[in-house]
């Protein structure tokens, strides 16, 4: 009877998973993680070192990419005369001073800059005129001149 009563009531905290019922699980899993992974202790340590090195390399690459993007943003802010960002400058400083903008992005920025410079120059304006229809321009000009003459004749009695 005592056995039945003890098994029904038992330890009240064991059912909640807070403490007392974990004895069987601890016995089932080995205490050494190398044995759990099926490796020797040296292999496990080497494996852990590799994981740490790979993670550090990934983090360094990620930081470098973020710094490249920040550098590009700084270049664009300078180009368009926008306010500077402390966050971008801090990112560049964290990565070091050897951060450059990726070549593909730099080519895109340079192409945009040359297009804008071409549009702003006199030669660019002449090129825009070449793209327009000259006959249409002549018709508009003659229509405007004749319209001005007719209005001037109406208002001025000398003409």
Image (cartoon, rainbow, N blue to C red):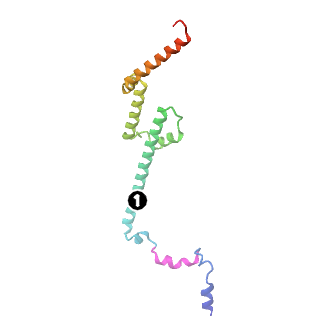
Q: Is residue 114 above or below residue 103?
A: above
Q: How many badges with numbers are in the image?
A: 1
Residue 46's x, y, as percent? 37, 62
Q: Residue at x 49, y 18 (%)?
A: 147
Q: Nearer the viewer, residue 32 or 123?
A: 123
Q: Which residue is identified by label 1?
A: 51
Q: Is residue 60 left or right of residue 90?
A: left
Bounds of the magenta segment: 19-30
**85 left or right of 47 in image:** right
Identity of the residue furthest to the bottom in this view: 1
- Let me know if residue 9 is in the magenta part: no
Taken as a whole, is the magenta stretch helix, strand or loop? Answer: helix
95 lies above or below 15: above
Quarter of the image that includes the N terminus: bottom right
From the viewer's side, name the closer residue of 137 and 106: 137
**Residue 62 image position (x, y, % from top left):** 43, 49
């Amino acid at each position: 009877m005592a056995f039945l009563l003890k098994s029904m009531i038992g330890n009240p905290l064991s059912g909640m998973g807070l403490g007392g019922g974990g004895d069987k699980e601890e016995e089932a899993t080995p205490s050494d993680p190398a044995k759990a992974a099926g490796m020797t202790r040296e292999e496990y340590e080497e494996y852990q070192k590799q994981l740490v090195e790979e993670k550090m390399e990934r983090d360094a690459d990620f930081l470098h990419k973020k710094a490249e993007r920040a550098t590009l943003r700084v270049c664009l802010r300078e180009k368009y005369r926008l306010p500077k960002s402390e966050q971008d400058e801090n990112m560049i400083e964290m990565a070091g001073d050897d951060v450059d903008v990726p070549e593909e992005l730099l080519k895109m920025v340079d192409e945009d800059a040359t297009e804008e410079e071409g549009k702003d120059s006199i030669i660019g304006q002449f090129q825009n005129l070449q793209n327009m229809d000259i006959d249409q321009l002549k018709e508009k000009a003659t229509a405007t001149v004749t319209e001005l003459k007719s209005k001037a004749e109406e208002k001025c009695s000398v003409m």
